[in-house]
Image (spheres, grey):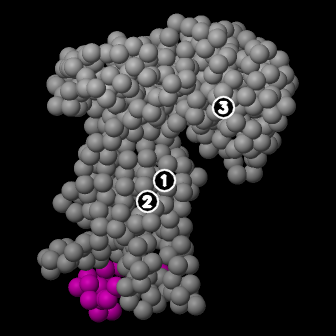
């Protein structure tokens, strides 16, 4: 039975009486209440009674189960009028008591607005990612701009948890409710300045709290391979592979290297007469001529094996896999390639030479690598911040740089373009945009034999013999053109090594 204001008053229980109830000090309960402060729960110190202003079946039951674990019996739920809790809050403020989740930075009713402001500012700053790090005493928000993480704002821990909970429980399409102790993925669309952006987020528990990373994608921003920074030779190789009707076209690189953006730009250019089927987890960008399957939105009773088996009957001309990340997706890609299908996919590997080893590690049969039509093209790409052309500086280089330049490129340099760390009004710390440093290796008869023998050094010799640029060669072109500097290249890729 719901207890009204008059009934509480008649029973001698007023808002002030409610404020006299000693709240629970059990850490797990306190943490739970902090995450659900908007729902007006109060638990007595002994854990015997839950006071709440209205029934919320799922969360009330969850709190009851939490208390039952250490009470060894279910607690009693006391429903009270919303006005009691409003009065209770006023009394807390009057008495100067600290509120659990309220701070001067983000008001209780403004958490959604705060999330929107953070995302809006990130988009305006051309940030690719937003990091929310919730720790023991505070929460930090950082923006990744042109590859570098820059501090945005610092909040209290409680505000950080409110932001996180709002992201997952209000904005996101995720399979579970927020908990800082459980890994969780999600995605949602965000509208800003009359444009729609795709946001993918991931939560990872951490020793002192959790870290949430939000990847921001602009579906209206479609850049060509040339605009991304690929060479004409690489563009021709990728185009030829895309026009093929069988084999694996693989894009590798570390996280935040632009793989998905590259694949997306290619899918957006596939002619309408080809049926493209894309399997993603989750769908980040939508393409009108592509049939897109969102794994994150599937019912729990639909298995991945059933879904993948169904794709064969869809008669696709091109299959797109967001990522080959485990043995199951590797096995699927392998089977489809053996059936003569054309597949485009991404995976994490270090350079084109590392792709076959990565596939083998994920369970693919190395014996298939030498089959004609199984592998089509191996691509590796990295994103490196570009120097701002308005404030970059050209300086005489020291003896160490001259020696390194001679060893890497065979030609000594007297001067080199460098980043202006002070920056200008048109850049961020001397950087303005990012460019791809890549290598693209078509798979022919000789390469298949090298793969079968696992002669990885021989693959590099094979590339040089055919005049195929490695990442060192591509970096050299951009260094000489003043688009990047050596320090930045090696910080974002790895130390350049002669022969790679």
The answer to whether one can see residue 158 in this image is: no
Q: Residue at x 80, y 18 (%)?
A: 373
Asked whether, in this view, residue 142 is left or right of residue 364, the answer is left
For the magenta stretch, what is the residue range?
A: 1-23
Q: Position of residue 478 (x, y in %)?
A: 39, 16
Could you tell me if residue 104 is visible in this image?
yes
CA–CA distance in space, label 2 to label 1 = 7 Å
Q: Which residue, given by chain and number where applicable, does mark 3 sit on?
A: 355
Q: Is residue 97 left or right of residue 81?
A: left
Label 1 sits on a secondary structure element that is strand
* Disc marking residue 163: none
Name the residue at 29% across, 93% down.
12
Whole-percent x, y for residue 181 in the image: 50, 65
Quadrant position of residue 93: bottom left
**Residue 465: x percent and y percent?**
64, 11
Label 1: few (<14), some (14–19) or many (≥20) C-alpha neighbours in 10 Å: many
Q: Residue at x 49, y 41 (%)?
A: 200
Q: Nearer the viewer, residue 89 or 200?
A: 200
Whichever of callouts 3 and 1 sits on the residue coming sooner in the sequence is 1
Q: Which residue position holds label 2?
A: 210
Q: Is residue 21 magenta?
A: yes
Q: Secondary structure at mark 3?
A: helix
């Amino acid at each position: 039975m719901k207890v009204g204001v008059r009934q509480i008053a008649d029973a001698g229980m007023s808002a002030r009486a409610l404020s006299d109830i000693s709240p629970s000090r059990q850490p797990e309960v306190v943490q739970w209440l902090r995450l659900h402060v908007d729902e007006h729960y109060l638990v007595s110190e002994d854990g015997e009674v839950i006071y709440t202003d209205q029934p919320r079946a799922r969360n009330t039951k969850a709190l009851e189960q939490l208390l039952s674990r250490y009470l060894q019996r279910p607690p009693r739920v006391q429903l009270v009028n919303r006005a009691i809790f409003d009065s209770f809050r006023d009394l807390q403020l009057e008495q100067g008591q600290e509120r659990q989740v309220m701070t001067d930075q983000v008001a209780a009713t403004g958490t959604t607005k705060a999330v929107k402001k953070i995302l809006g500012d990130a988009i305006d700053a051309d940030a690719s990612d937003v990091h929310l790090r919730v720790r023991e005493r505070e929460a930090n928000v950082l923006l990744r701009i042109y590859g570098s993480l820059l501090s945005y704002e610092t909040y209290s821990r409680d505000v950080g948890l409110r932001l996180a909970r709002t992201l997952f429980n209000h904005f996101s399409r995720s399979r579970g409710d927020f908990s800082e102790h459980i890994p969780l993925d999600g995605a949602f669309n965000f509208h800003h300045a009359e444009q729609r952006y795709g946001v993918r987020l991931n939560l990872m528990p951490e020793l002192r709290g959790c870290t949430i990373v939000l990847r921001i994608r602009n579906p209206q921003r479609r850049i060509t391979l040339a605009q991304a920074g690929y060479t004409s030779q690489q563009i021709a190789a990728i185009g030829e592979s895309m026009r093929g009707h069988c084999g694996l076209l693989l894009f590798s690189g570390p996280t935040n290297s632009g793989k998905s953006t590259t694949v997306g730009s290619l899918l957006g250019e596939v002619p309408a007469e080809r049926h493209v089927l894309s399997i993603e987890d989750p769908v980040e960008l939508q393409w009108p001529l592509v049939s897109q399957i969102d794994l994150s939105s599937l019912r729990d009773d639909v298995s991945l094996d059933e879904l993948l088996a169904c794709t064969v009957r869809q008669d696709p001309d091109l299959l797109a896999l967001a990522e080959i990340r485990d043995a199951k997706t590797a096995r699927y890609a392998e089977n489809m390639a053996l059936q003569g299908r054309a597949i485009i996919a991404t995976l994490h590997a270090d350079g084109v030479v590392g792709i076959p080893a990565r596939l083998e590690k994920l369970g693919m049969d190395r014996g298939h690598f030498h089959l004609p039509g199984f592998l089509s093209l191996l691509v590796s790409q990295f994103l490196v911040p570009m120097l701002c052309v308005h404030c970059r500086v050209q300086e005489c280089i020291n003896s160490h740089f001259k020696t390194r330049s001679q060893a890497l490129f065979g030609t000594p340099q007297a001067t080199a373009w460098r980043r202006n760390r002070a920056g200008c009004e048109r850049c961020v710390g001397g950087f303005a945009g990012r460019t791809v440093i890549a290598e693209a290796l078509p798979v022919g008869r000789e390469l298949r034999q090298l793969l079968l023998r696992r002669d990885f050094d021989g693959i590099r010799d094979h590339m040089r013999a055919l005049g195929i640029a490695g990442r060192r060669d591509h970096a050299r072109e951009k260094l000489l053109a003043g688009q990047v500097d050596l320090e930045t290249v090696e910080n974002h890729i790895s130390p350049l090594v002669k022969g790679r």
